[in-house]
Image (spheres, grey):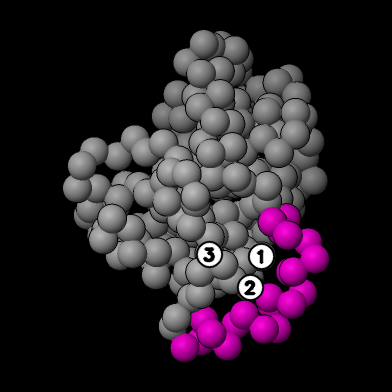
Amino acid sequence: MQRRRFSAGLLAGAALPALAQGIPAEGTHYVRLSQRAPVDAPPGKVEVLAFFWYGSPQCNTVTPALEAWAGRLPGDVLFRHVPVALRDEPFTAHQRLYYALEALGQLPALHRKVYYAIHVGRTRLDAPADMAAFVARQGVDAEQFRAAYASKEVQAKAQRARQLSAAYKIDGVPAIGVQGRYFTTAGLAGSPQRLLAVADFLIPLARKG
């Protein structure tokens, strides 16, 4: 899903030469926020947020490269996923799915499997009953999942995710926010893969304040 539909085709052809030179341009490949978004990282750390939606084909495509990239980030970078809700359903349900899996300690095992189920298995995971059945097939207790999904903790995290998405002005995914100051999207960068190259450029920029 592109941030600005009218520019996606132009970016694919015009923005990439600048990226090939290693110089992402402000206003073309990334945006500097006029008002800083909240940052949860302690002083001396750089917060990097990967905004996503399980139902996005582009998020599904970029996830393997994103996870490999996140595993190579410097020690002063704090990386985390933020599920977005571009509208109510099924976005809010997928937010709670993500945070319920996190609460149960199942994200390492099931995060990629959720994408696979939706995009390859064509499994509908838009309702709690469908999600509970899915996790049960993966060996997770369905009642524990239902309890986590309905918990105040998960609801609070989903609300925080919506606040962060609004602060970063996210209206398309995949997107990456850096230190409450910058964001880039697949559309701005030119492709989901080049999204990570722009993020690499923004992290040292954020260190400078």
Left or right: 71 as drawn, with respect to 159:
left
Q: Quadrant of residue 12?
A: bottom right
| 27 up-or-down from 71: above or below | below
Q: CA distance from mark 3 to mark 1?
A: 10 Å
Query: Magenta part mainly helix, strand or loop?
Result: helix
**Residue 50 in the image: x percent, y percent?**
50, 49
- Give the secondary structure at mark 2: loop
The disc placed on residue 30 is: 3
Q: Nearer the viewer, residue 178 or 93?
A: 178
The disc placed on residue 190 is: 2
Sequence-wise, the earlier of marks 2 and 3 is: 3
Q: Residues within 10 Å of mark 2 (few under 14, many from 20)?
A: many
Residue at image coords 59%, 12%: 150
| 17 up-or-down from 10: above or below | below
Question: Which quarter of the rendered picture does the N terminus lie within?
Answer: bottom right
Name the mark nearer the viewer: 3 or 1.
3
- Circle 1/circle 2 CB separation < 8 Å: yes
Q: CA distance from mark 1 to mark 2?
A: 5 Å
Can residue 193 be seen in this snapshot?
no
Q: Residues within 10 Å of mark 1 (few under 14, many from 20)?
A: many
Q: Which residues are magenta?
A: 1-21
Residue at image coords 34%, 35%: 40
Badge 1 amino acid = Gly
The disc placed on residue 175 is: none
Badge 3 amino acid = Tyr
Q: Is residue 205 in the magenta section? A: no
- Give the secondary structure at mark 3: loop
- Circle 3/circle 1 CB separation < 8 Å: no
**Residue 49 in the image: x percent, y percent?**
45, 47
Q: CA distance from mark 2 to mark 3?
A: 11 Å
The residue beneath circle 1 is 187
Left or right: 87 as drawn, with respect to 36:
right
